[in-house]
Image (tube, rainbow, N blue to C red):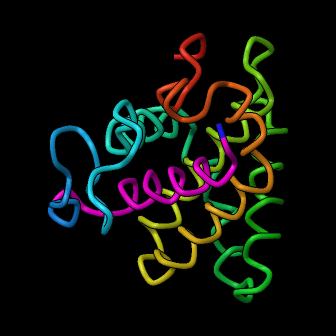
Amino acid sequence: MAPQNIDNQTLDILSCLFDEEAEVGFRTRGTIQTDGGVDDDDDFDPVVIADKLREVADHLDKEFLKPHIKIIQQAAADKMVEEFGRSVDSLCSSHVAQKLEVAPEFQLLKASMALGLYVRKTCPDLKDSIQITMAAFIKSRLAGWISRQGGWVGTKGIPKTFI
């Protein structure tokens, strides 16, 4: 799968993840309708993938997320991606996130989803910034892994062996 397609799909998924159900009213027949019509990939359903990512994120203890909120809040916009990455790395190195049977990339995905959603919930004013930050993080740190897994469609967003 081409990286550009993964990048576009990631933006669609994050949009679904961050928008309230009422705001995702442009969802039709299991796909997202864009300006150009229905997404080219018939199997791609960003709402389903966003729901699965939300489930994965819910399994991370929120107490481990709290210390990272102030750091992200205080980071200037140009430093937010860097601080978000540091926070995700810190979460992944904690004993709560580490499981030997889980790929390190999946740990990054889980921690980034949990942290991003927690920031959105606790700091609504950072919603747009954290969504952009998460997209940049996924592009720089996880896009290659997602591509090797068969893309978002190939994995339905999450490798089946980790659900």
Tell me which corner region of the image, top left, top right, bottom left or bottom right, holds residue 80.
Answer: bottom right
Where residue 2 appears, x then y in whole percent?
Answer: 67, 44
User: Residue drawn 20% across and 52% down?
Assistant: 27
Where residue 130 appears, x then y in whole percent?
Answer: 57, 71
User: Residue drawn 40% across and 61% down?
Assistant: 15
Closest to the observer: 144 or 159? 144
Where residue 120 appears, x then y in whole percent?
Answer: 46, 67
User: Residue drawn 80% across and 30% down?
Assistant: 104
Reply above or below: 125 against 112.
Answer: below
Tell me which corner region of the image, top left, top right, bottom left or bottom right, holds residue 74.
Answer: bottom right
User: Residue drawn 68% across and 35% down?
Assistant: 146
| Apparent side of residue 96 relative to residue 83 in the rendered image (left or right) | left
- Say whether residue 11 is magenta: yes
Closest to the observer: 94 or 10? 10
Magenta-colored span: 2-21
Q: Quadrant of the N terminus?
A: top right
Query: How would you classify the magenta stretch by its main secondary structure?
Result: helix
Where residue 129 appears, x then y in whole percent?
Answer: 56, 78
Reply above or below: 160 against 23.
Answer: above
- Count all numbered tags in the image, as a single digit: 0
| Apparent side of residue 13 relative to residue 1 in the rendered image (left or right) | left
- Say whether residue 12 is magenta: yes
Reply above or below: 122 against 87.
Answer: below
Closest to the observer: 3 or 27? 3
